[in-house]
Image: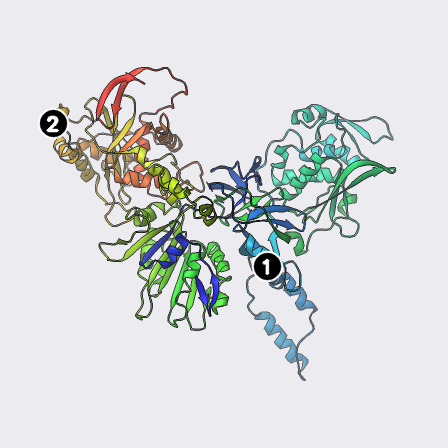
């Protein structure tokens, strides 16, 4: 609990969050299975590049949009829960969306909106031009001119424009209005969706014109604007005017295209047009506006009226997909006093022309007011909670669009609060790190909720809070390896890392040495928060998760310093536990793998993981004596400054491949650094590893099973081993061959190799994998499940990771490519291997 002057600033959740703040170890990692809150109802629609999905249907790997209109991927989907409280947010354009009390939103309050205006350079220039001179006293004109010129040449520093703050639904409800009764929160309107150009059967502008003025059941249009008929003529259509004074045009060849689009007899905007490029969507809108659109007389805003519910829905989505806020007003369509049913009028201020017809275009006004770029929250009312779920996306802002109105919605308070613990001491210095400046800004926004109440004063230039005692808390970022060296000579008593798996181990270890003090009254410690996944997943897992059970203190045998992992459980939900006290007991009774995933957070399976099929309890086995009749081969990924890896494989009688030995050239105590051994030295190690005497000592193989010795059928290696770049001597492969270790070039197709790993891990089903690994192959077991996707090539593995064992594995598997079995197969007789009995038997499979 954070307290200042007997006031509670913040109350931790009971359980792991409270435990995290009470730990006394030097290093503590807080994290695991994310998902405590931040939920939306299951029926909430989510826009995708191909149409729509819902919060209940979305899956890991699905594509959504972030607030900038760019495509982002779902990297985690969490279990369905019913929250303790829920709210319905209603915006000034009539749109509403339901969310739990903990759901996060990026909002601007009234003060931030005012600052956004005052700090705008255009607004400041206009004010300066209108403001009279403030020169006082009996000063000469020359003096005033000189002072004015000097002030213009050396303007005072201007604080950067605010970027909004992340606030929960509960916070929005509690601060809905200012003290003067005005709306206090606004959410930026999402920018236009960024989508590629697509081949469409009909020009979007022409489709828009037909949807507006076309005959529902024919390729004809009725228009008083000959420019529209001319547009069809320029597109290659034959345009027929039935009478010289008629406004009815026949477009020969148009009906068949409309029929193929499914709109003939059923006017609506096809999905492929709503998810076309921005330019194509704008052309579609211009066609609709040139026919059924108009310009509001007083405001110059764009207006569109329709009596078709399908056109109304499509038009709303189209306008919003272009980044504009649209209001819809329902009325009655009347002609000659006769009511013909409902009509809908849409109105919005566009930031660019939405017409092509000159008579309409000259009346349109372009949006300039700030209010057109924000949705203002007009109400935030409590509602009955319903089942909801939370997702995480890989956008830099962690925002994604939700609801038919495409409202941006947010996807670490404990670290921020912990930094306040020693602010009463004048010599206290703390620093909180994120990987990028943008991410650090998000933490700064969170600190603004708490630090002012503790007496903190924000200093923008230094990016730090200063407290009455003189204590300082800084916010910094480490975007590149080497940035940590900027802190040489610094001294901090509290160092925190948010999303630790985003950092390099070298950065973390270097900054540990900066955690020190010469004042015995100050306590020195390091805290971190993170979820599984990210480029640093494997070293974080090795440092915190693998060394000791969760919540248990680990003492480093070299330094004597202590560290601990506090898991953030998915079901840390007091309401759930009160409603079902035996729920955790039932979770504890599940098999180990499921218990770890649901109760503690499984660090062998994480967001962004390439090989999510990996299960340690299925794919890792105890070593055993390999039968002499099994085929054996090896594969190598060569490395000098980076680690090399050689794997040995054995194939059983049913085609299951076992990785039974590895040779890994990692420099002790280093991260992804090779031993810099020569090819000759490594070849000699391979020879020694394949010597039966060593094999007996290492793996306990019985003498009678060895027959004439270990026979390696073949070896495959990276084709680069045959290159002679930069020297005239033998290649790597030739050097190995001179020592009696022979290789042939591997198939290094990256995507096909990756697919082979997937297929082998899946095998014949969850309990019958096609690949198994001896638990002595520690580096393959350590690095394979930690691999993440490449951000630039999302179908491939990120090669900046420690992927050497993976490369050797795919080389080996590509030497024996395997296709998945058909779903229905006749039983056949085959040899089967019994893992428990370590014997083979002939049976039907």
In front here: 448 or 319?
A: 448
How far across and down, in percent of the image, does residue 310 sit?
Answer: 69, 34
Residue 335 image-quadrant placement: top right
Q: Badge 2: how crowded within 10 Å, few (<14), some, or many (20+)?
A: few
In front here: 432 or 100?
A: 100
Q: Quadrant of the N terminus?
A: bottom left
**On the image, numbered disc 2 is attached to which residue?**
703
Q: Kindly report the distance in space between the C-alpha atoms of the residues bearing marks 2 and 1.
A: 79 Å
In front here: 435 or 145?
A: 435
Q: Secondary structure at mark 2?
A: helix
Q: Earlier in the sequence, mark 2 or mark 1?
A: 1
User: Is residue 87 shown above or below 158?
Assistant: above
In front here: 67 or 288?
A: 67
Q: Identify the residue shown where x is 65% and y is 62%.
A: 123
How far across and down, in percent of the image, does residue 365 sit?
Answer: 73, 51
Is residue 783 shown left or right of residue 795?
A: left
Is residue 82 shown left or right of residue 797?
A: right
Instruction: Confirm whether residue 731 shows in the render.
Output: no
How far across and down, in percent of the image, does residue 810 sit?
Answer: 33, 32
Instruction: Confirm whether residue 149 shows in the render.
Output: yes
User: Is residue 228 shown above or below 627?
Assistant: below
* Eye-nearest disc, 2 or 1: 1
Q: Quadrant of the C terminus?
A: top left
Is residue 348 shown left or right of residue 106?
A: right
Q: Secondary structure at mark 1?
A: loop
Q: Identify the residue shown where x is 45% and y is 65%.
A: 3
The numbered mark at residue 175 is 1
């Amino acid at each position: 609990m954070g307290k200042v002057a007997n006031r509670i600033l913040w109350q931790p959740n009971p359980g792991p969050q409270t435990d995290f703040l009470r730990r006394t170890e030097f290093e503590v990692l807080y994290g695991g299975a994310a998902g405590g809150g931040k939920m939306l109802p299951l029926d909430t629609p989510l826009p995708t590049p191909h149409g729509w999905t819902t919060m209940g249907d979305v899956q890991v790997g699905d594509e959504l949009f972030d607030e900038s209109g760019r495509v982002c991927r779902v990297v985690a989907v969490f279990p369905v829960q019913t929250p303790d409280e829920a709210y319905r947010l209603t915006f000034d354009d009539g749109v509403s969306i339901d969310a739990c009390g903990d759901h996060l939103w990026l909002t601007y309050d009234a003060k931030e909106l005012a600052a956004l205006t005052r700090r705008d350079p255009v607004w400041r220039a206009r004010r300066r031009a209108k403001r009279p001179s403030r020169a006082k006293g009996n000063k000469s004109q020359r003096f005033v001119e000189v002072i004015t010129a000097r002030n213009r040449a050396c303007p005072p520093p201007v604080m950067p424009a605010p970027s909004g703050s992340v606030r929960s639904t509960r916070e929005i409800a509690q601060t809905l209005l200012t003290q003067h009764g005005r709306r206090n929160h606004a959410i930026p309107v999402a920018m236009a969706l960024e989508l590629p150009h697509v081949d469409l059967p009909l020009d979007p502008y022409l489709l828009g014109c037909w949807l507006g003025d076309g005959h529902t059941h024919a390729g004809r249009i009725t228009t008083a604007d000959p420019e529209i008929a001319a547009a069809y003529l320029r597109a290659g259509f034959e345009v027929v005017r039935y009478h010289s004074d008629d406004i009815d045009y026949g477009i020969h060849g148009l009906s068949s295209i409309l029929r193929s689009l499914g709109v003939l007899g059923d006017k609506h905007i096809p999905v492929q047009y709503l998810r076309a490029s921005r330019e194509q969507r704008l052309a579609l809108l211009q066609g609709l506006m040139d026919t059924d659109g108009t310009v509001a007389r007083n405001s110059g805003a764009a207006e569109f009226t329709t009596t078709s519910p399908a056109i109304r829905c499509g038009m709303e989505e189209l306008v919003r997909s272009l980044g504009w806020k649209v209001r819809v007003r329902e009325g009655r369509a009347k002609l000659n006093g006769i009511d013909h049913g409902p009509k809908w009028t849409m109105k919005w201020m566009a930031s660019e022309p939405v017409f092509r017809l000159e008579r309409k275009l000259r009346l349109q006004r372009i949006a300039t007011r700030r209010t057109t770029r924000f949705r203002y929250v007009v109400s935030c009312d409590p509602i009955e909670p319903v089942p909801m779920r939370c997702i995480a996306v890989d956008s830099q802002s962690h925002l994604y669009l939700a609801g038919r109105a495409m409202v941006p919605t947010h996807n670490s308070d404990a670290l921020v609060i912990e930094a306040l613990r020693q602010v009463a001491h004048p010599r206290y210095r703390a620093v909180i790190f994120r990987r990028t400046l943008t991410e650090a800004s998000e933490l700064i926004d969170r600190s603004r909720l708490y630090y002012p109440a503790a007496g903190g004063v924000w200093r923008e230039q230094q990016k730090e809070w200063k407290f009455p005692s003189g204590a300082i808390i800084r916010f910094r970022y480490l975007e590149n390896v080497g940035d940590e060296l900027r802190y040489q000579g610094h001294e901090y008593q509290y160092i925190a890392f948010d999303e630790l798996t985003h950092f390099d181990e070298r950065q973390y270890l270097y900054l540990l040495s900066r955690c020190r003090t010469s004042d015995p009254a100050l306590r020195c410690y390091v805290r971190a928060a993170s979820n599984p996944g990210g480029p640093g997943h494997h070293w974080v897992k090795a440092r915190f998760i693998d060394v000791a059970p969760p919540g248990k203190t680990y003492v480093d045998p070299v330094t004597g310093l202590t560290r601990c992992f506090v898991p953030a459980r998915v079901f840390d939900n007091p309401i759930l536990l009160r409603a079902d006290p035996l729920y955790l007991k039932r979770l504890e009774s599940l098999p180990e793998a499921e218990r770890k995933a649901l109760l503690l957070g499984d660090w062998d399976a994480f967001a962004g993981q390439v090989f999510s099929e990996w299960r340690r309890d299925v794919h890792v086995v105890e070593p055993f004596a390999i039968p002499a009749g099994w085929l054996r081969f090896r594969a190598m990924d060569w490395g000098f400054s980076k680690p090399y890896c050689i794997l040995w494989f054995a194939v059983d009688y049913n085609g299951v491949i076992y990785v039974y030995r590895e040779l890994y050239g990692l420099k002790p105590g280093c991260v992804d650094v090779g031993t810099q051994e020569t090819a000759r030295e490594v070849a000699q190690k391979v020879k020694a590893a394949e010597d039966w005497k060593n094999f007996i000592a290492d793996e306990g193989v019985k003498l009678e099973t060895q027959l004439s010795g270990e026979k390696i059928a073949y070896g495959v290696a990276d084709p680069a081993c045959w290159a002679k770049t930069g020297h005239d001597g033998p290649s790597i492969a030739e050097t190995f061959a001179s020592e009696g270790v022979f290789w042939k070039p591997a198939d290094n197709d990256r995507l096909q190799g990756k697919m082979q790993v997937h297929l082998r891990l899946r095998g014949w089903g969850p309990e019958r994998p096609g690949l198994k690994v001896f638990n002595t192959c520690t580096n393959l077991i350590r690095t394979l499940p930690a691999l993440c996707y490449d951000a630039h090539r999302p179908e491939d593995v990120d090669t900046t990771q420690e992927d050497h064992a993976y490369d050797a594995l795919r080389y080996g598997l590509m030497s024996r490519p395997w296709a998945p079995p058909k779903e229905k197969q006749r039983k056949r007789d085959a040899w089967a291997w019994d893992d428990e009995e370590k014997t083979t038997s002939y049976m039907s499979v």
